[in-house]
Image (cartoon, rainbow, N blue to C red):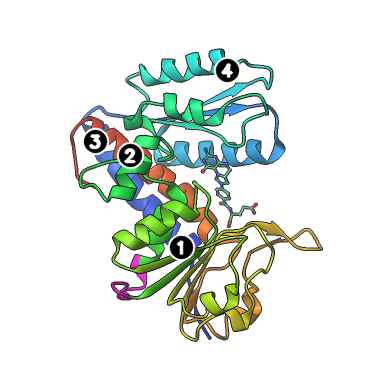
Amino acid sequence: MAIIIDGKQIAKDLNTQTQQRVATLAQQGIVPGLAVIIVGDDPASAIYVRNKHRKAVKLGIKSVVRELPATISQAELLEIVQTYNHDDSIHGILVQSPLPVGLDEQAIVAAIDPAKDVDGFHPLNVGRLLANLPGHYPVSCTPRGIMTMLGTLNEHLRGKQAVVVGRSMIVGRPMAAMLLNADMTVTIAHVHTKHLSDLTRTADVLVVATGVTHLIKGNDIKRGAIVIDVGMDRDENGKLTGDVDFDAAVDRAGAITPVPGGVGPMTIATLMQQTVDLCEWSEQLGSN
Ligand SMILES: Nc1nc(=O)c2c([nH]1)NC[C@@H]1CN(c3ccc(C(=O)N[C@@H](CCC(=O)O)C(=O)O)cc3)C=[N+]21
């Protein structure tokens, strides 16, 4: 039986650390601020944004949720991003994805001050990550949270094989960059990859972020591998499940994340961590 990586507990521990950092900043009269912009009325997005808001408030972070109608123009939305760029009480800006059709998400992300890019999606920050530049900059929260989870396992990663299934800008690509920066040998697989199972069976660390329910079966996994499931899928009964067939995988893997309770809670905890990072970096305080 694999170790089940308790994302919920690791997120709780990270949130405790974040709360303590916020308390230390408060003694200096500094309050980290997060602005979340949500456009239109996608119900799933509304739930995510409410969860982020609640968590921020709980940790002592100032949280501003800006709800905008789906009819807003690109120019108006850019204008609102600019107001937060210039607002000294806001250290992190997040534009909830997906945006309604007609809005150019890339142009909006590029308009965010890179020093306030709490999602790590700005092309400057993406480039810094790819180049493994030293210094402080935000990176995508889901893969950063996964690196935090891997860190708790105290396994040596250097020189070992990582396979990332999925090539999105939010998860797959930044995940591959982080694993490469950790000196792993990284392969990115995707929808066109041939003989996927042969490849995944070589992975010491397997990260799956495809949105395909139970794409990865038990015998697609190397014995003892670390398996990270980024999937957030609904099974035939409407229950939340992952891209990995957990019940089969748990007998092969050395360690595995569940869905729910794995990567998801870590994403939100990392967003909070990174909001406080941005605040400290802007004040040139601290180093994490
Ligand atoms: N600009 C932007 N940044 C994001 O970070 C972003 C986004 N847009 N758009 C949507 C996705 C999705 N996302 C999740 C975060 C936490 C859970 C989470 O906590 N999931 C729980 C379960 C929640 C449930 O039961 O439905 C878990 O896995 O245990 C899920 C999904 C952040 N996103």
- Report which residue position mark 3 lands on: 281
Q: Residues within 10 Å of mark 1 (few under 14, many from 20)?
A: some
Q: Using the rendered view, name the quadrant where residue 143 is placed.
A: bottom left
The disc label shown at residue 276, or none = 2
Q: Is 99 situated above or below 20?
A: above
Q: Is 133 situated above or below 150?
A: above
**Magenta stretch, overall SS:** loop
Q: Is 288 situated above or below 246?
A: above
Give the left or right position of residue 27, taking residue 100 as reference: left
Marked residue nearer the N-terminal end (2 or 4): 4
**Residue 157 magenta-highlighted:** yes
- Report which residue position mark 1 lands on: 9
Marked residue nearer the N-terminal end (4 or 3): 4
Q: What secondary structure is found at the residue carrying circle 2?
A: helix
Q: Tag 2: residue type?
A: Val
Q: Tag 1: residue type?
A: Gln
Marked residue nearer the N-terminal end (3 or 1): 1
Marked residue nearer the N-terminal end (1 or 2): 1
